Image (cartoon, coloured by chain):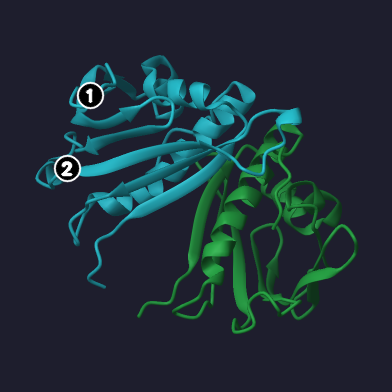
Chain colours: A cyan, B green
Amino acid sequence: MNTKPKFVYSTLIATTPEKLWAALTDPEFTAQYWGGTRLESDWTAGSRIVFRWQGKIVHDDTILKSEPPRLLSYTFHPLHMEELRSEPPSRVTFEIEEFKGQSTRQGPVVKLTVTHEDFPADSKIFPMISNGWPDILSSLKTLLETGRAIEFAKGT
Amino acid sequence: MEKPKFVYVTHINTTPEKLWDALTNPEFTQQYWGGRRVQSDWTVGASIKHLKADGAVELRGEVLQAEPPRLLSYTFLTASGDRVPDEKSTRVTFEITTAFGVTKLTIVHDGFEPDSKLVFEITNGWQAILSSLKTLLETGAPLPFNYKC
């Protein structure tokens, strides 16, 4: 297969676009569902975004697009593992839309689509993010709907 | 040309047994599956039907694997035939595992033709169904939408 790898995942969440945007951009919030990772930025296009985990910067990236509460895109370049650092940055995009089938009488439902692309054909990062995003996005949905993130047990 | 398939993973705060029940109990499926009752006796070789609220059969298939509460697989064919007349029977597989103390559901829907249009339809359908299933198991109520499959 010589097509470039691309990860696409959609989930429907009982929340508003504004609350979902806050969950994606507030470090106090991301730490709860992203394995303790704080995402820090001023969230404007061209700005720096860092992922901070246990006090250390594990990603140092750039905001590509920021249109709250609908569209967010940034480069994605893990720094914390030697064999990943040499791989060029990929790109992740979050699209938030109101779900068409929703019943407004019963409360809002939004559709979040995460697209992660621009990987080299032999990417080592791609298989890792393909496992990682369903964990993170499952926990994000649980947090927004129940008030508590999924508690994944420690270990491998 | 590679054959298209749909793969989706979701983690749910529940037990494998409750998730198995949610996938196989028509009283449960009609809450999150666009009102569909999914009926079978869930033994290998048994028939399976998806019934709409009015009782009409929408989908039919055959159970290929049933190992409660871990593995369920069945063929999947549109019963009406008029929407996608060229599609052959496809197959859906549900795998339930426990990862990091959390129940993990992996869905693979394959067997599509290389130029299948159905795979795009089912992608939207599964995303809505599986999102609502997770919400129902975690909060006691499905997502508040009227999804029309």
Residue B8 disc label: none
The amino acid marked with disc number 1 is: Val
Kindly identify which chain the residue marked by label 2 belongs to. A
**Residue at numbered disc 2:** A89
> Looking at the figure, which quarter contains the N terminus of chain A?
bottom left
User: Between A155 and A4, which is closer to the camera in this rendering?
Assistant: A4
Which quadrant holds residue A44?
top left
Kindly identify which chain the residue marked by label 1 belongs to. A
User: If you read the primary sequence from the N terminus, does the residue marked by circle 1 or circle 2 appear first?
Assistant: 1
Residue A90: % across, % down? 21, 45
- Vertical side of A152 occupied by B62: above or below: below
The residue that appears at 23% across and 24% down in the rendered structure is: A49
Circle 2 crowding by C-alpha within 10 Å: few under 14, some 14–19, many from 20: many
Residue A36: % across, % down? 38, 24
The residue that appears at 69% across and 58% down in the rendered structure is: B149
Residue A50 disc label: 1
Q: Is residue A59 left or right of residue B126?
A: left
Q: Is residue B24 left or right of residue B27?
A: left
The residue that appears at 44% across and 33% down in the rendered structure is: A154
Task: Assign a secondary structure to mark 2.
Answer: loop
Q: Is residue A76 left or right of residue B91?
A: left
